[in-house]
Image (cartoon, helix red, strand yellow):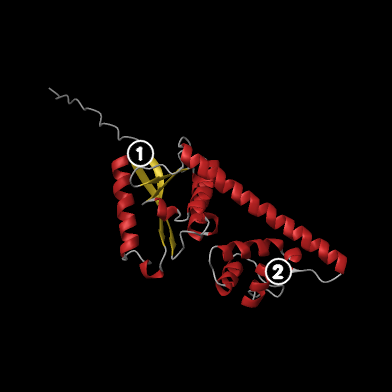
Amino acid sequence: MAVQYTFKPMPRKRNRVQAVGYIRTSSATNVGRDKDSERRQRFAIERFAKAAGYELVDWFNDPAVSGADPIESRPGFAALLDRVENNGVRVVLVEDASRFARDLVAQELGVLTLIKRGMRVITTSGEDLTDTTDPSRIMMRQIAGSFAEYEKRRLVRKLREARERLGRLGGRKSYAEARPDTVALAKQLHANGLSYRKIAVELAARGHVTGTGKPHAASAVQKMIHAGN
């Protein structure tokens, strides 16, 4: 007589929300997976993800990047945005708010960017930096957004005035008129504390070079930033 076995279905594994981890180290001495800062951040994120039910599907890192730098200027975070936009992941895990951005204005402007993309940034303490119900955070984002809009309008006005002066004088085009995008980026990087030499390197890395394809000289960067001031 054949023996019949009754098989119980295995319990289904709880669906885990996919997330990506983001690490930022502000000093070159902390760069590398064996260094304390990066190792600590990775461990904290992994521990929180396991406890909170997140599945870490990718990691992104910005080594030796200042916490005051806007997120859109960071190579690692730019790659993160490409990743989540193309694959549907909507959660970013960071050790704490300072790893996302130490400067409050940069942090809130970055949060606004992510909210528009339907994304969330969560710290290992469980704080949702993209929370849209906290009145104080809403106020800070409005202030940060207004400040960014003011700076944008101020730059546009200065460029227009420079063009008008050039038209009256009949002289050669200034940097501001010939390459307004390059000038705007140079001023943004200068506001973040970068030296003229480092700005020239960063401009070249983003495709902003001279007509002969070479990086701008530090003296040329200085002229871009202070022209019309």
Residue closest to the eye, 29 or 158: 158
The residue most toward the left is 1
Residue 101 seen in the figure: yes
Counting from the top left corner in percent of width and height, residue 60 is at 43, 56
Residue closest to the eye, 124 or 83: 124
Q: Tell me which amino acid carries mark 2.
A: Ala
Q: What numbered label is drawn on residue 107?
A: none
Q: What numbered label is drawn on residue 227?
A: 2
In the image, taking residue 217 as reference, residue 133 lies left or right, namely: left
- Look at 41% across and 55% down and name the residue there: 99
Q: Quadrant of the C terminus?
A: bottom right
Q: Secondary structure at mark 1?
A: loop
**First of labels 1, 2 by sequence position:** 1
Q: Tell me which amino acid carries mark 1.
A: Arg
The residue most toward the top is 1
Q: Quadrant of residue 223?
A: bottom right
Counting from the top left corner in percent of width and height, residue 17 is at 38, 39
Q: Quadrant of the N terminus?
A: top left
In the image, taking residue 75 as reference, residue 146 lies left or right, namely: right
- Look at 61% across and 69% down and name the residue there: 204
- Look at 35% across and 61% down and name the residue there: 38
Please determine whether, in this image, residue 117 is positioned above or below residue 186.
above
Residue closest to the eye, 215 or 109: 109
Residue density around tag 1, few if under 14, some if 14–19, many if 20 or more, within 10 Å = few
Residue closest to the eye, 56 or 128: 128
Residue of label 1: 16
Q: What count of labels does the image hold?
A: 2
Residue 59 seen in the figure: no
